[in-house]
């Protein structure tokens, strides 16, 4: 069954990482647990970390309106 279209508009950003980080992201994506490729895995991990930070009181720049999807 096809995945439902994302209801939240997304924008593209560019993230530069070192080669060891790229390899780690690729290895995580091979498991299929975090994403289908390094970029997808990086996006998922970034979103998870932002959600975690959003639960911490007093974090500057993170509000309910700025919470990740």
Image (cartoon, rainbow, N blue to C red):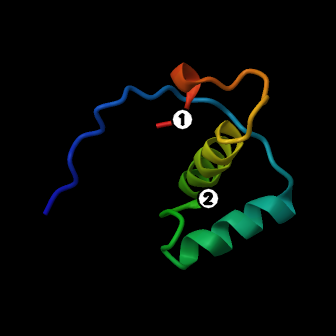
67 left or right of 4 in image = right
Using the image, tell me which numbered label, if any, was put on residue 38. Answer: 2
44 or 13: nearer the viewer? 44
Mark in front: 2 vs 1: 1
Give the number of callouts.
2
Q: Residue furthest bottom?
A: 31
Instruction: Residue under label 1, please give it.
Output: 68
Q: Which of the 4 image quadrants contains residue 54?
A: top right
Judging from the image, what secondary structure is the residue with disc 1 in?
loop
Residue 50, horizontal then vertical, whole percent:
65, 41
Q: Which of the 4 image quadrants contains residue 55?
A: top right
Q: Which of the 4 image quadrants contains residue 27?
A: bottom right
49 or 44: nearer the viewer? 49
Q: Residue at x 79, y 29 (%)?
A: 58
Residue 30, horizontal then vertical, whole percent:
56, 76
Q: Which residue is drawn at 68% across and 26% down?
A: 62
């Amino acid at each position: 069954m096809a995945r439902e279209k994302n209801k939240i508009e997304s924008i593209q950003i560019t993230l530069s990482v070192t080669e060891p980080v790229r390899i780690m992201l690729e290895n995580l994506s091979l498991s299929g647990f975090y994403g289908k490729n390094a970029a997808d895995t990086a996006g998922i991990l970034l979103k998870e970390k932002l959600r975690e930070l959003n639960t911490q009181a007093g974090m500057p720049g993170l509000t309910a309106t700025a919470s990740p999807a």
